[in-house]
Image (cartoon, rainbow, N blue to C red):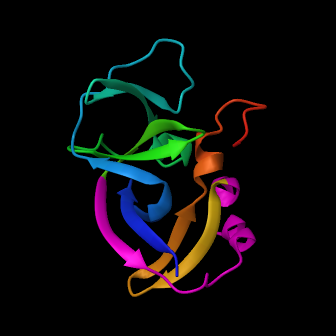
Amino acid sequence: MPEMIVVEVAGEHLGIPVGVVRHVLGPQTVYPVPLAHPAIAGVLNMRGRIITAVDCAHRLGLARDEPAAASSSVVVDWNGEPYALLVDRVDDILELTEPAVDPRELASFVPSWHALARNLYSTRSGVLVELDIDRMLALTPGREAA
């Protein structure tokens, strides 16, 4: 059964597969990078290593009324490199059953998420969208997961 770290981004609850998560960090200083892709919030320092920080709200097309007061970072491994996914908070770890809905049906709810969702799961608190980390981090044309 899949396990997900449940995170909140701009009021939405999303799942990140536990198998790709390397670290969960509290609030960090994120340093902007000039001319970076708009979804790149900048870089952060994790124990002396510089890590690219991706703004999940921007990547998902979610607007915030105000910036998140104290955000967290979920560090994932992608193509052998760590990336920090900036989220508002980490809520829980859930063990889930089989997906509840065909992910293609997500397009009818939020069209911009169709390409970024892997599966949908039914939980006690509603539907949980599993993020497709490969697609979340493939920010430039031609850059695909290995």
Q: Is residue 5 above or below residue 65?
A: below
Place residue 32 in its image quadrant. top left
Q: Is residue 107 above or below residue 73?
A: below
Residue positioned 22% across, 45% down in the render:
26
Indicate left or right for 38 with 27 as reference.
Answer: right
Indicate left or right for 57 with 49 as reference.
Answer: right
Q: Position of residue 47 (x, y in %)?
A: 25, 30
**Residue 44 visible in this rendered orientation of the protein:** yes
Which of the two residues, 73 or 11, is positioned nearer the viewer here?
A: 73
Which of the two residues, 30 or 3, is positioned nearer the viewer here?
A: 3
How many numbered dots are placed on residues in this image? 0
Q: Position of residue 54 (x, y in %)?
A: 46, 36
**Residue 11 visible in this rendered orientation of the protein:** no
Indicate left or right for 44 with 60 as reference.
Answer: left
Which of the two residues, 126 or 64, is positioned nearer the viewer here?
A: 126
Which of the two residues, 98 or 116, is positioned nearer the viewer here?
A: 98
Instruction: Specify the farthest residue to the right.
Output: 142
Q: Is residue 122 magenta?
A: no
Residue positioned 54% across, 68% down in the render:
129
Q: Is residue 114 above or below residue 126?
A: above
Q: Position of residue 95 (x, y in %)?
A: 43, 80
The quarter in which the C terminus is drawn is top right
Residue positioned 30% across, 70% down in the render:
92
Q: Position of residue 76 (x, y in %)?
A: 46, 47
Instruction: Specify the farthest residue to the top.
Output: 34
Place residue 29 in its image quadrant. top left
Instruction: Specify the farthest residue to the front.
Output: 80
Place residue 117 in its image quadrant. bottom right
Q: Is residue 104 magenta?
A: yes
Highlighted range, magenta: 89-115
